[in-house]
Image (spheres, rainbow, N blue to C red):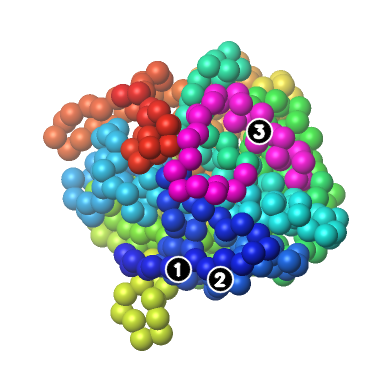
Amino acid sequence: MSTCYITFTTQRKIKPVIIGVLAITSLLAGGCKKYLEQVPDSTWTDLSTPAKVSKLLGTAYPQASYITMCEAMSDNVGDKGVGIYYRPNQDAYAFNDIQWIEEDSPEAYWKACYTAIAAANQALTACEKAADPSAYKHQRGEALLARAYAHFMLVNIFAKSYDAATAANDPGIPYVTVPETVVIKQYERKTVAYVYDMVEKDLLSGLPLISDDAYSVPRYHFNQSAAYAFATRFYLFKKDYPKVIAYADHTFSNNDVANNMRQWNGTYASMSPAQIFDLYANASEKANLLIAEAPSLWGRNGGRMRYDLDYVHEAQILGRNVTGGAWSYPLYYYGSQDYFVPKLTEYFVKNSVNATIGQPYVMTPLFTTEEVLFNRAEANAWLNNTSAVLADLNLFASKRIRNYNAAQHTITLSAMQQFYGIADARGASIRTILDFKRAEYLQEGQRWFDLQRYKMPVIHITREGQTLELKADDNRRLFQIPAAATTSGIALNPR
């Protein structure tokens, strides 16, 4: 881990971004170099052209990873007894507040999100003050989507999942809409309902302004498909199911989901682990709708930590499934217990050309084609559109089951009901969807959000025989807000 010190210089045209306790002065931190592009120098405070605002917006995405802590909190992992000891992993497995503030921690994610929000707000200010605001409409759209996304992730990590019956009373997180001009500013958490209302407002305002033509590499920004994918996630979490379906159907031209999916039982099947690592989170992979880099040790430690994927959970997650066929996900291991599916690899950025120290990064898909499919299927399940659910699940299976044969592997309602012993069509459909998602996003931290949405209990058993249970109403399900944020008047989550 490296430390860098950056001096901000300003010009008169636009007030400087001053990041208070919410984000701390880390707007340009993270090893001093971005993996995707070089950090803008001090001239970025001159935001007098759309291109310069776009350059600033390259920093409007959270440069932090939630994977380590969310994966360890979930039911995807076991206690292997041996492995790398890493506080974000071991504290999360024990359902304790994480005693670590660097990469992969709740504090790092909190800071990164508010740093991204600060950049988005500075960009929006520039767009509004421009002599010709219409020339900045695409930048305005990206800034609104980026601001909405960072707040949405914060509220779903540090607050309770949206529940219409309680959201108006559940504490949320501060929704920041203007650049900070003081070091320590006072904020209110407001409520989960308020945060969702603000996210929706930014999402709907920004979405029509997004244009893929504004980017040289659209998958590094909120392109149109990524924006629609975000809308499907937002409305799924809000339980507005008709809107999930509507936005899913607009995500791809001609609703062509199939040709934009990851080909696990096709192209990927003949690849080596190194080749998959190179492609999985790459902009050339069509399934990746939005990708971002983050300082993280996950690319180095994933699969190797003590509380990680073990044989029992691998067999449970990647074993039998409702199709009767075998998953095509390739499973490898570093040693006798270190299981992993090749996905996210480390990119080490040196502090300088001749340096031996630097910052490890991972590239992470924030939105994928498969999520759009799953979100639509889940929405249709809640609306009792079983035929539509089956169509999406069978499409997914056709890209994931080894040696797929429709005659042998087609999913039917009766097959789901029998496999899970659930008579209710909706219940059987949702169970299938959640299990397919669990397999698809193994070792990516996504399982945690489904556990939260459905308030499913999580049980961890240690090698010493201790049973640790996280019940549906356990306060520890909310990651703790950084203690430093209390200086800005933000109340910590109860314990």
Q: Position of residue 232 (x, y in %)?
A: 69, 38
Is 464 positioned to the left or the right of 446 in the image? left
Residue identifier under label 1: 7
State which region is magenta. 178-207
**Residue 237 lies in magenta, yes or no?**
no
Q: Which residue type does callout 2 highlight? A: Ser
Seen at 62% across and 30% down, the residue is 196
Q: Is residue 305 left or right of residue 103?
A: left
Disc 1: CA contacts within 10 A as few (<14), some (14-19) or many (>=20): few
Q: Amino acid at mark 1?
A: Thr
| Vertical side of 215 occupied by 429: above or below | above
The residue drawn where x is 37% and y is 29% is: 492
Tell me if label 1 and label 3 are in contact, CB under 8 Å.
no
Q: Residue at x 51, y 53 (%)?
A: 18
Numbered label attached to residue 488: none
- Res 472 visible: yes
Cβ atoms at labels 2 and 3 below 8 Å apart = no
Q: Earlier in the sequence, mark 2 or mark 3?
A: 2
The tag earlier along the polypeptide, 1 or 2, is: 1
In which quarter of the view is residue 388 placed? top right
Q: Nearer the viewer, mark 1 or mark 3?
A: 1
Query: Residue at coordinates 60% horizontally, 72% vertically from top-left?
Result: 43
Residue 11 percent location from the top left of the image: 61, 67
Foreground residue, 383 or 197? 197
The disc placed on residue 42 is 2
Q: Are marks 1 and 2 in contact (CB under 8 Å)?
A: yes
Measure the C-alpha gap from mark 1 to mark 3.
33 Å
Q: CA distance from mark 1 to mark 2?
A: 8 Å
